[in-house]
Amino acid sequence: MRLTDEERAMFAGEMGEPKRWAIDHMLKVGAMFDAEDMVPVSQAHMMADPESLGEAGVRFLERLAAHPEAACRVAIPMITDPRGVDLNYYRPLGQTENMADLERRTIAACSQMGILMTDTCINYQTIMPPVQGDHLAYGDTGVVIYSNSVLGARSNFEGGPSALAAGLTGRTPRYGLHLDENRKATKRFVLRTQPRELTDWGVLGAVIGRKAGSYWEVPVVEGLEAVPTSDEMKHLGAAMASYGSTPLFHLVGVTPEAPSIEAVHGASLVATEIAEDDLNALRSNFGGKGDKLDVVVFAAPQLSLVEMQMVADLVDGRALHPDTSLIVCTSPTVYADATRMGLVRRIEVSGAKVLQGTCFYQQYAREIGEANGWKRLLSNSAKIVNILGGYGYQPALASMEDCVASAVSGEIV
């Protein structure tokens, strides 16, 4: 790979061991993907919850953070994905003191390196959203697909070490979606049905993701009759990435790189139609009405302020069934605003728990389920029901309105 003088200095260790490790890691990633050089990035976003890191990962961060500040401090704004533990709420959930201690150590090490502990997977809705053409090193799949597709920025899925290396160096290998040729459409879909609410958008994303089927495929979608809201785009992209490893999609006439089907080289592609039957077939994979319900989860992605208001309106004047829990996950930024506006209080009066800075599947979901005896789970997120079947849950999918009604009745309505 071609290196600049500054990159060569990093590799020679002239800027300290953390940056030497980081550029060496980037060279290995670049060699894997045949990158010719590095591209400067304006932001990095790292998944570093302690469930994923474990003791060894936390010790690695601590070793880097022990170097002098000039060597270990990140070179660009760097932020974090949701944490594994809400330190204000972990004991009632059944999380252990060891889990909380790993969390505290991770926060301390990251803070020492100048990483901003934003603890969110919706930074594009809350913290310095990237702009079209902006090169990034983002980790969370939902963050990557939204930033690429809706905002026209450029990022691959960065693993935790790669995102950290990008933060320390301000660079990432120039491959994948940093290159113009990899952003053109490869699969074409035409809608014969229209999504109506958030869950429908997630189901549509799941269907397209499955049909696309590869990180290297780029779907282009025609036939939308209305421009999706930010939250609708969020659910669409998060599910598409979860079911298909998709990091980029285009909506004709909506997303910035697809003013027309021709602009993304999609006009010559064979079109696949998506009808209501396709969406219903995916929904049928999950639990049905009348099943006893242990827990309802609103997460993955974290809730926006608008979604927090929706939940508060739905639970007003209602109490949860004594055998059913309701967990709401949002970012610390949204939590602060929702607290100020009284939304958190309105939600928690019903018996629900609002967690800040976490996302359910990243916070020891299996251990929480075992500690609380939770098996049957309901959510309006197509992404989270796709994930949690692997954590010992029996997941079901419903609209936000039906999720709340089910939490009140104690069974899926």
Image: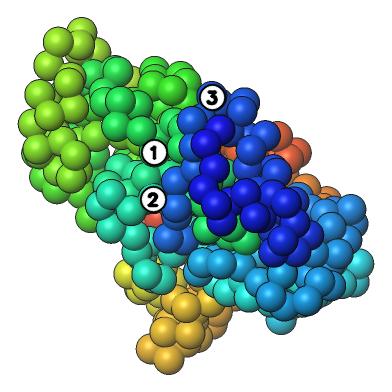
Residue located at (69% from left, 58% from top): 19
Q: Is mark 3 on a helix, strand or loop?
A: loop
Query: Where's residue 395, x and y in %?
Result: 60, 39
The residue positioned 47% from the left and 26% from the top of the image is 215
Please identify the quadrant where the N terminus is shown.
Answer: top right
> x, y (%) of residue 89?
72, 76
The residue to which callout 3 is attached is: 34
Q: Which of the two discs, 1 and 2, labels the residue nearer the N terminus?
A: 2
Residue that protrudes farthest toward the bottom in the picture: 340
Mark 1 is on which residue type?
Answer: His
Q: Quadrant of residue 169?
A: bottom right
Q: Residues within 10 Å of mark 2 (few under 14, many from 20)?
A: many
The residue under label 1 is 178
Residue matched to label 2: 135
Tell me the CA gap for discs 3 and 1.
13 Å
325 in relation to 135, above or below: below
Residue 96 lies in quadrant: bottom right
